[in-house]
Image (tube, rainbow, N blue to C red):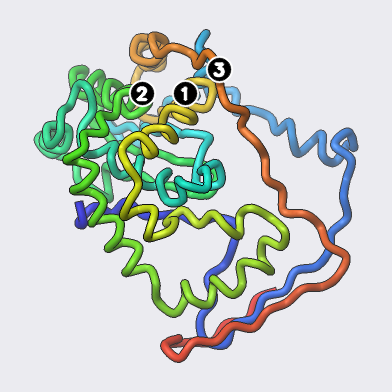
Amino acid sequence: MGIFLRGIIVTGFVLFAGCAGVSTTATKNYSPDTETNASLNHLPLDSNITTGTLPNGLRYYIRKNSEPQNRAELRLGINAGSILEDDDQRGLAHFVEHLAFNGTENFPKQTLVDYLESVGMRFGPDLNAYTSFDETVYMLQIPTDSTAIVDTAFRILSDWAHNISFLPEEVEKERGVIVEEWRLGRGANARMLDKQFPILFHNSKYAERLPIGKKEIIETADVETIRRFYRDWYRPDMMAVVAVGDFDVTQIEALIREHFAPIPASENPRKRQEFPVPDHAKTLFSTATDPEATYTSISV
């Protein structure tokens, strides 16, 4: 699993090295019903996109694109990332993402990876995933000249959506991989970022929810605690499927309905809270240095 190029995409901040400074200033609040915000909140949808919502709440977006030929990009987007972790789950949104590649109901353990490699897919260019503060996204690039491969690709996306196995032995195997990923990320940039987060995300929960999480939780979280994040947030009303490529749109829409409509809606869903970064009256700044930093950067 260490060779996988699944990265943690941390959005909403800039990495600084050397003697780094960051400042933020207060901004004006606009009413949600102003014309400016209304236009931003209702961007027109490309007329070439076929979209719909299944009865269980899952949304889908399909667009035919003939180049490159016989190729398609598929995405399963989950409207949940590290910001929604409970205090005892810090780092487990990312842990769930890793476990998606360690076995599902229809692809036990290594068979998922074996199948994808057997049809010519490679981790990184064709197969990837990332966890951010607000989202988790799974990505497949597939050939479309085989109906069997296309069908199986949607079965894999569906399994990731609701059938990850969480086998104890796979959890333990992946735990060390993620701890090593945490360790490799604790360089000069990360140490300086720790000092800047209270400024970048002043009075916001984002400052406490880096996707990589806390090492002690990654090392000790039990299967049920990890599964709880999956059960709470991997549900149809929090998901979207995106397909773009050289294919028949009607066929793809039918496959989405076939593989995702049977997923039951959550009976007692947790509320998906929003965590704004509040405005502030003063200009805030920070300066962070580290003896191992290799360059200097200033950002406003």
Residue found farthest to the bottom: 291
- State the residue at coordinates (39%, 47%): 94
Q: CA distance from mark 1 to mark 3?
A: 11 Å
Helix, strand or loop at disc 2? Answer: helix
How many other residues sit within 10 Å of disc 3, few (<14), some (14-19) or many (≥20)?
A: few
- State the residue at coordinates (26%, 51%): 175
Residue at which label 2 appears = 162
Which of the two labelled residues, at mark 2 and mark 1, occupies the earlier sequence position?
A: 2
Q: CA distance from mark 2 to mark 1?
A: 7 Å
Helix, strand or loop at disc 3? Answer: loop
The one of 5 and 40 positioned closer to us in this rendering:
5
Q: Quadrant of the image for the C terminus?
A: bottom right
Above or below 154: residue 23: below
- State the residue at coordinates (37%, 39%): 226
Q: Are marks 2 and 1 in contact (CB under 8 Å)?
A: yes
How many other residues sit within 10 Å of disc 1, few (<14), some (14-19) or many (≥20)?
A: many
Residue at which label 3 appears = 268
- Left or right side of 183 for 34: right
Q: Position of residue 230 (x, y in %)?
A: 41, 32
Q: Is residue 50 visible?
A: no
Above or below 132: residue 257: above
Q: CA distance from mark 2 to mark 3?
A: 16 Å
**Which amino acid is tagged 3?**
Asn
**Which amino acid is tagged 2?**
His
Q: Image quarter for residue 171?
A: top left
Which of the two labelled residues, at mark 2 and mark 3, occupies the earlier sequence position?
A: 2
Q: Which mark is residue 99?
A: none
**Which amino acid is tagged 1?**
Arg
Helix, strand or loop at disc 1? Answer: loop
Q: Are marks 1 and 3 in contact (CB under 8 Å)?
A: no
Q: Which mark is residue 235?
A: 1
